[in-house]
Image (cartoon, rainbow, N blue to C red):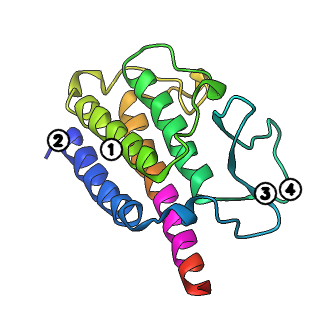
């Protein structure tokens, strides 16, 4: 099996675990605040949904809502797609959250479809990439593909745990 085959297999497994929770979310899950200190998404004055954000490390770290986590997936995945395609990634502030569960599901499925196309191109695996690492880290597109699998798995687990906690609380 090729490295592309391994990465694709990992991605399909990770996606299936993410989709399990994504398909079971209800609208109320997205903005449920599991703690007093949390990060969420909220509409700005123009009605565009924006995430809470801090440019410095916080201690303690706010607990994210499922809505914030889905925005985070959309932001880093959009950025990863741009790096994999060697195009200019959007600024974080240019990636809003859709604002609805249906919009979020559509966004996630669209990103999955785009990523599936990127994964088919094994000609780029050895090219250098500077996301999510600094350029001097010497990472490649193959590393990026593996990182996407790991990051999606982590975020899927976080969303799943939030969904289960909310359901358990009634």
For marks 2 and 4 on the same chain, the one whose residue lies earlier in the sequence: 2
Give neighbour class at mark 1: few <14, some 14-19, many 20+ (Cα, 10 Å). some
Q: Residue 155's spot in the image, x, y percent?
A: 51, 56
**Residue 147 in magenta?**
no
Q: Nearer the viewer, mark 2 or mark 1?
A: 1
Query: On the image, numbered disc 4 is attached to which residue?
Result: 59
C-alpha gap between disc 3 and disc 2: 39 Å
Dominant secondary structure, magenta: helix
Disc 2, disc 4: CB below 8 Å? no
Residue 159 tag number? none
Q: CA distance from mark 2 to mark 1?
A: 26 Å
The residue that mark 2 highlights is 2
Q: Which stretch did the figure color magenta?
A: 154-164
Is 160 one of the magenta-colored residues? yes
Q: CA distance from mark 4 to mark 3?
A: 5 Å
Q: Residue at x 53, y 37 (%)?
A: 76
Disc 2 on helix, strand or loop?
loop
Task: Please state the horizontal and vertical placement of residue 139, each as a whole percent of the image.
Answer: 48, 29
Horizontal side of residue 39 vs 160, given as left or right: right
Residue at 39% from the left image edge and 49% from the top image edge: 105
């Amino acid at each position: 099996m090729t490295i592309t085959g391994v990465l694709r297999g990992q991605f399909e497994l990770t996606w299936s675990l993410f989709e399990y929770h994504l398909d079971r979310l209800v609208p109320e899950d997205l903005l449920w605040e599991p703690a007093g200190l949390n990060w969420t998404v909220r509409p700005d004055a123009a009605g565009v949904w924006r995430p809470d954000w801090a440019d410095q490390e916080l201690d303690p770290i706010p607990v994210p809502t499922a809505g914030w986590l889905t925005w985070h997936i959309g932001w880093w995945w959009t950025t990863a797609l741009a790096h994999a395609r060697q195009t200019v990634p959007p600024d974080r502030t240019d990636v809003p959250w859709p604002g609805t569960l249906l919009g979020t599901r559509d966004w996630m499925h669209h990103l999955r479809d785009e990523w599936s196309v990127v994964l088919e191109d094994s000609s780029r695996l050895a090219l250098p990439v500077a996301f999510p690492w600094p350029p001097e880290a010497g990472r490649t597109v193959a590393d990026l593909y593996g990182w996407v699998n790991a990051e999606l798995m982590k975020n899927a687990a976080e969303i799943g745990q939030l969904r289960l906690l909310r359901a358990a609380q009634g």
